[in-house]
């Protein structure tokens, strides 16, 4: 008998208590400091979409490179809770908490073991990588919830073969594909497991095929937009090509989140991870091991293969696959025969994750419970926009030197002045990944020489990713300049320069 099957199906009170406690811990860690870092470029997209009528919002989503489901959910959420930073991030946090419970359900269904499911839920609750993307007003936690929910429903459907469950599974699959394109790889992993199950059980499972057909039918309305977005990414994209350190770096972040680490540590972490995977595969005799292996490895293999044509490999896109690595770790720990050793490893793993959680806040320049000394606070756009909001006069001009801070400033802008993005060309010549989906040509200023004499200009620019200081005409006389350090490091500093036009 598999060691996972030694427990009963129903959770004892103590297990339910620990599950609730795990979810409570996950909730606290996700709400902790959740607005301490300013909204950034990608989140600004989420927030600014909310300002358009439904029809125009859908049109502009189609001009970008992501599917629409998260934006629909966020819009309905904003009708109730508004579009403030706490509100829009709270949606991701709430779904992140639901992900913890979905992880419990999936592991319980997969291994028929409540205590193992509780351990997996705990690891998801405290994982810095999962927490990191629970704090972003983006589609990542919706994707994590749906990938676990669909995996659970697949196993439930295979076990019961009930039409109702297969329909639920089809809806969850379609919802996943409407959430993020990397979830295609996760759904493909489920499809591989479905085929493996049919081969193993010698059962055609007609209802299962019907479920996948229903998923396809539900997704058909978005296929034209999908094809256009694929061509858009193939033509040009900003993600750098992966190198030999990409996978080790991703593995590290899947466990500890935060910034990167030195190469020797990455090598050690990768070796340990491979040993864990081998141990799990060797000791786990249940067929379910294949679903976990497929769900972990297929996103890596597929994204690397596609990156030979156009790079799409990005650490944060593995937030979905990382769930199955955490489940694998939980299983590997649970396979250890000695109970005291298992509990000791769980305590150590939890302690390390909590330490890393607070250390990551320190690295971001945010004071927290344990790391308050030598904190270099980096207020970023919150302070830069507040300075302009307090200082600009109604007749002043506001120009922004980079699209990577333009949209975030638009979100925080409380003046009645329309900011313009400085560009060397019209909308048709700007790379789509600069944010053209949210731009019109009247949002641009192409020539600083058109600014009339005696005007006051606020020029906002960044030293970070995608930014540089625009060259200004000689009759622009600098009045003052202020720097606002931003975080994380790739954002550099936001600079506000005031000019008087002579």
Image: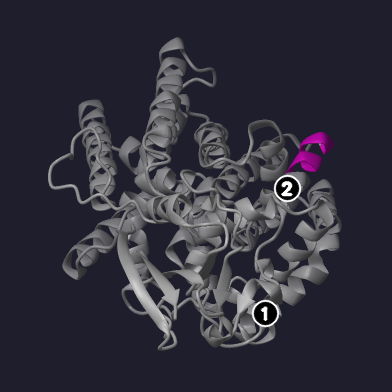
Q: Is residue 315 above or below residue 447?
A: above
Q: Kindly check if marks 1 and 2 are in contact, taking CB atoms under 8 A apart as contact.
A: no
Let me know if residue 306 appears in the view: yes
Which sits in the foreground, 285 or 298?
A: 298
The span shown in magenta is 163-169
Q: Earlier in the sequence, mark 1 or mark 2?
A: 2
Answer whether residue 164 is magenta in the image: yes
Instruction: Examine the residues drawn in magenta and state their main secondary structure.
Output: helix
Above or below, 313 relative to 386: below
Which quadrant of the figure has residue 250? bottom left
Front residue of this view, candidates 257 and 9 = 257
| SS assignment at label 2 | helix
Q: Residue at x 68, y 69 (%)?
A: 437
| Residue on which the image places disc 2 | 72
Circle 1 packing at 10 Å, graded few (<14), some (14-19), many (20+), is some
Question: Taking 71 as reference, is 378 left or right?
Answer: left
- Locate residue 446 relative to residue 292 in the image: left or right: right
Q: Quadrant of the C terminus?
A: bottom left
Give the residue at x 48% y 69%. Answer: 456
Give percent across and percent down for residue 201: 68, 49
Residue at point 49%, 68% (across, down): 404
Considering the image in quadrants, where does the N terminus appear? top left
Q: CA distance from mark 1 to mark 2?
A: 22 Å
Kindly state the secondary structure of the residue where label 1 is placed. helix
Disc 1 target residue: 232
């Amino acid at each position: 008998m598999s060691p996972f099957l030694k427990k009963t199906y129903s959770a004892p009170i103590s297990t339910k208590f620990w599950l609730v406690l795990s979810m409570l811990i996950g909730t606290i860690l996700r709400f902790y400091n959740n607005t301490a870092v300013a909204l950034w470029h990608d989140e600004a997209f989420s927030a600014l979409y909310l300002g358009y009528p439904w029809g125009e919002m859908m049109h502009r989503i189609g001009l970008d490179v992501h599917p629409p489901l998260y934006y629909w959910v966020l819009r309905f959420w904003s009708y109730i809770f508004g579009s403030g930073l706490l509100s829009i991030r709270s949606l991701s946090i709430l779904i992140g908490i639901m992900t913890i419970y979905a992880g419990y359900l999936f592991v319980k269904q997969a291994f028929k073991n409540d205590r193992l499911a509780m351990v997996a839920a705990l690891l998801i609750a405290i994982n810095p990588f999962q927490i990191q993307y629970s704090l972003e007003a983006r589609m990542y936690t919706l994707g994590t919830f749906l990938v676990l929910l669909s995996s659970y429903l697949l196993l439930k459907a295979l076990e019961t073969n009930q039409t109702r469950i297969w329909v639920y599974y089809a809806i969850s699959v379609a919802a996943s594909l409407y959430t993020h394109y990397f979830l295609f790889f996760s759904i493909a992993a489920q499809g591989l497991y479905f085929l493996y199950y049919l081969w193993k059980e010698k059962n055609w499972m007609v209802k299962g095929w019907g479920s996948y057909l229903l998923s396809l039918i539900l997704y058909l309305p978005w296929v034209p937009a999908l094809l256009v977005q694929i061509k858009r990414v193939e033509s040009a994209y900003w993600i750098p090509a992966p190198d030999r350190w990409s996978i080790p770096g991703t593995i590290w972040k899947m466990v500890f989140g935060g910034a990167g680490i030195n190469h020797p540590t990455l090598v050690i972490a990768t070796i340990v991870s491979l040993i864990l995977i081998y141990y799990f595969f060797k000791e786990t005799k249940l067929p379910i091991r294949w679903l976990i292996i497929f769900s972990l490895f297929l996103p890596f293999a597929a994204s690397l293969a596609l990156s030979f044509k156009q790079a799409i490999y990005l650490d944060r896109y593995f937030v979905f696959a990382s769930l199955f690595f955490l489940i694998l770790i939980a299983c590997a720990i649970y396979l250890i025969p000695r109970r005291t050793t298992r509990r000791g490893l769980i305590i150590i793993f939890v302690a390390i994750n909590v330490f890393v959680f607070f250390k990551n806040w320190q690295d971001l320049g945010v004071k927290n419970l344990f790391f308050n000394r030598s904190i270099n606070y980096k207020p970023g756009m919150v302070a830069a926009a507040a300075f302009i909001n307090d200082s600009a006069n109604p007749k002043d001009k506001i120009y922004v030197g980079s699209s990577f801070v333009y949209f975030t400033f638009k979100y925080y802008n409380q003046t009645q002045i329309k900011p313009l993005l400085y560009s060397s060309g019209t909308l048709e010549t700007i790379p789509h990944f600069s944010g053209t989906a949210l731009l019109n040509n009247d949002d641009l200023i192409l020539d600083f020489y058109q600014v009339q004499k005696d005007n006051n200009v606020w020029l906002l620019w960044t030293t970070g990713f995608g930014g540089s200081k625009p060259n200004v005409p000689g009759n622009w006389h600098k009045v003052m300049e202020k720097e606002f350090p931003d975080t994380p490091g790739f954002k550099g500093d936001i600079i506000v320069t005031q000019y008087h036009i002579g």
